[in-house]
Image: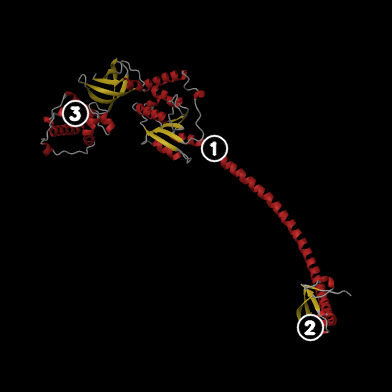
Amino acid sequence: MDHALFRKLLTWRNQTAKKEGVEAYRIFSNETMRMIMEVGPKSKEELIAIKGIKEKKFDKYGQAILSLVNGNLEFDREEANIKTETDQNILYSVGTYLTLINKSLEKQFARIQGEISSLDIRGTYLFFSLKDKTDKSILSCFMWQNSYQMSGVALAEGMEVVVSGFPEVHRPTGKFTFRTEAVELVGEGVLKKAYDDLKAKLEKEGLFAIERKRALPNFPQRIGIITSKEGAAIGDFLANIGKFGFKISLIDSRVEGQLAVKQLLGAIRTFRKKKDIDLLVIMRGGGSMESLLPFNNEVLIREIVDFPVPVLAGIGHEKDVPLFALVSDRMVSTPTAAAKALNESWEKVVFKIELSQKKIFSIFENSLVQKQVTVSRTLEIMKESFNSIFQRFERAEGSLKQAFVSMRLCFVEVNKNLSLYGANLFKFLDGRIKEINLSVASSQKLLQTHNPERQLELGYSIVKSGEKIVRNISQVKKDDTVNIKVSDGEFDSKVINISRH
C-alpha cells in the first residue's frame, strides 16, 4: 500500500511539473516526498509541519497531497502523457527505498526471546545483541532511551529477555536491526526477584503507607476509567455500577504485557491534563505475573503517586498483588469490586434516606393514630354538644310555637280593637269636621260683616295718599292729590282746604 502511495506521489509530481514547465524537484524535493509518505498527513497542520511545505506550498498543492494520501485523487495519465511504470522501471533514491522497505517491515511486529550478548548504552538510544542459546544466532537490536526507561528493566549481558518490536534497516548504517519498543524479563524466578526488589524500594520510600493514601470521595460522579474497551473488565464494571448519575470517561488502553506501559502512561497523563474527574479507575481482570508486568513497572507506578485525584486499582492477582495496586489509594480485586466501591457512598446515603423515610412514616402513622383517638373523642364531645343544642332548639321551638299562638290571639284582638277604633275614629272625625264647618261659616259671616269694602256700600269711602290710607289730616297737605275709592269705583281729588275738628 505504501509502495502504491509512493508511485502515486511520483506520478502526481511529474504530472504537475510538466503542466507548470518546471523541474520535478521544484514541486517537492525527494526528502519532502519521503516525509509525506512516512507521515501520511491527514490534515493541513500535519502537512505544514513537514519540512519543505509552508503556507504558500500548501495553498498550491496541499489539497492534492491530502487527497492522494486519503486515496481520493485519480489521474488522467493520457492527458499528462505519463506512461504506466512497472516496479522495475521506478528509480528510487537510497533514502526513499529504505523508507519503503521499513514501512513494509513495520507490519512484521514480533516478540522474540533471547539472551543479551552485548550492550552499548548511549545518550538517547542503545544497541544490544540478542543471542539464541540453541544455535547461537544473533539479532542486532536498537532501542530509544525513553522506551528503555519505560520498560523498567536494567539490561545486562547474559540476561534472558523477551523483546517486542519490529525489524527495520538502520538508515545511517544500512544494517538490519530489530527496532525494540519494550523489554521484559523471562522466568518466574527472575520476575519474582525484580518484583521483590522494586517492592522493597518503594516500601522504603513510604509509597505503601496508609497515611499517604486518600479516601475515595463521597458521592463521586465524574469517573475516569482506563482499561481495554474490548476486554471483559469494562463489561463487568458497567454491569455492576449503580444508577447514581455517573459520568464515565473511558480511555482505551492495552492492559496486558510490557507494551501496555506506553499506552497506560499516555492515558494517565491525559486524565492528569484534563482535571475534570473526581476519581481515576484503572482495571483489568486477573492474570499471570507475566501478563501483569506493566503494573509492576516503576515508571507507571510513580505516575500515580501524586495524581490530582484518588486512584482506584481493580487489578486482581491471587498471589503477588501488583505494586501499582499497592501504591494506589485503594485497591480491589476485580472490576466488579471497583464498581461496588464507587457505589458505596451512594448506597449508604440511599439506605439512610430509606431508613429516615421509614422513621418518618412510622412517626406519621403513630401521630395519625393519636390524632385519630383525639378526633374520635372530639367527635363524641361535638355529638354530645350538638345533642344538647338540638334539645334546646326543640324546647325553644315549642316555646316559639306557643308564642306564635299567643301572638295570633293578640293579632285577632288587635284587629278587633282596630275595627272598633276605626268606627269610633270616623265618628269622631265626622263630628269634628261638622264643628269646623260651622266655625268656618261663622268666621266667614264675621269677615263679611267687618269687610271695609262692605262699608263702602253703606256710603263710606276709602281715601289714599300714595299707597297709604288716610286716617287723619296730618297725612295730607294742601294741593296733595288723593285717591278716593267708593263702592263702584275710584277717582282722584285735590286737597283744597284742611280743617280740624
Tag 3: Cα neighbours inside 10 Å, few (<14), some, or many (≥20)? Answer: many
Q: Nearer the viewer, residue 303 or 471?
A: 471
Identify whether 287 is placed above or below 439.
Answer: above
Eyeballing the image, is 426 above or below 31? below
Picture coordinates of residue 418, whole percent (x, y): 82, 77
In the displayed structure, would residue 128 be above or below residue 447? above
Estimate the x, y position of residue 402 in percent, counting from the top left.
81, 71
Q: Amino acid at mark 2?
A: Ser
Q: Mark 3 near mark 1, Cβ–Cβ under 8 Å?
A: no
In the visual, does 340 lie left or right of 126? right
Q: Percent from the top left, x then y, of residue 193?
A: 40, 19
**In the current view of this chain or complex, which residue is farthest to the front?**
496
Q: Quadrant of residue 312?
A: top left
Marks 3 & 2, CB-CB < 8 Å contact: no
Circles 1 and 2 in contact, beta carbons < 8 Å: no
On the image, numbered disc 3 is attached to which residue?
28
Residue 431 visible: no
- Mark 2 surroundings within 10 Å by alpha-carbon count, few (fewer than 14), some (14 through 19), many (20 or more): some
Q: Amino acid at mark 3?
A: Phe
Query: Which numbered disc covers residue 348?
Result: 1
Give the position of the N terminus as an image quadrant: top left
Q: Specify whether 164 is left or right of 302.
A: left
Sequence-earlier tag: 3 or 2: 3
Q: Judge depth for marks 1 and 2 and give the one in front.
A: 2
CA–CA distance in space, label 3 to label 2:
159 Å
Q: Secondary structure at mark 1?
A: helix
Report which residue position mark 2 lands on.
487
Say which quarter of the image contains residue 33.
top left
